[in-house]
Image: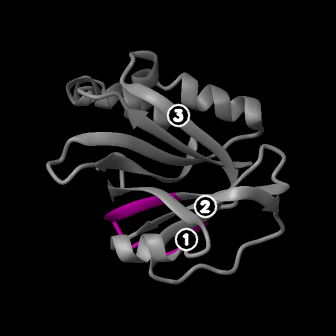
Amino acid sequence: MQFFCYHRDRSGSTPLRAAMVEEHWSYMDRFELIARGPTFLDDDTLTGSVHVVEVPDVAAARAFVFDEPSYQAGAYRDVLLRRTSWQSLDPSVTGGYLAIGFLDRPEPYDDLPAPRADLAGFGPLLSDDATRLLGAAALAATEEAARGALSRIAVVESHLWQRGGRR
């Protein structure tokens, strides 16, 4: 099963996150990650960390987000964790924007229309049993493209994003 995970940073946690980067990456190396990377403000202050992970079930997804070393150390203020059926699209997009949005009311889920090809990735945010559409998330080179991919969903937040992982 695929899960979309977004750890939101606590205010002032950038030094802690920087000190823990090797522990974070070593932890992430144990998982099959479909997408990943930090989010930040215009001044490079970290705001969070996005991961799309393949794990066997909801319990494993919860363990993935709550056992993460930076979470355990208190760097994150909260975690968004939702089932997804993520589509990785344009691998040449190595940075840009993450947009996350939610529907006013969940609706039955069978599939979303194919996203535009100019996205790095796109996926629905689903109920744990994957029967209800709650929202969607997109990674794109531009904020306009990321928000545009969520056209029928109210965008709640968008962040600068950079593809993550070991270099």
Residue 104 visible: yes
What residue does disc 3 label? 79
Q: Mark 2 belongs to which amino acid?
A: Ala
**Is label 3 in a helix, a strand or a loop?**
strand
Task: Tell which residue pokes out farthest to the left in this image.
Answer: 43
Q: Is residue 138 above or below residue 151?
A: above
Residue drawn 84% across and 68% down? 110
Q: Which residues are magenta?
A: 87-100
Q: Amino acid at mark 1?
A: Leu
Q: Nearer the viewer, residue 97 or 107?
A: 107
Mark pair 3, 2: CA separation = 16 Å
The kind of residue tagged 3 is Val
State the SS at label 2: strand
Asked if the residue under mark 2 is in contact with the one under mark 3, i.e. CB atoms within 8 Å, the reply is: no
Image location (x, y in percent) of residue 5: 55, 43
Q: How far is the residue under mark 2 from the one under mark 1?
A: 7 Å
Q: Are marks 2 and 1 in contact (CB under 8 Å)?
A: yes
Residue beneath the point at 76% across and 40% down: 56
Q: Which residue lies under the disc numbered 2?
A: 136
From the top left corner, tell me how far across and down residue 111 is, in percent.
Answer: 78, 71
Residue 138 on the magenta segment: no
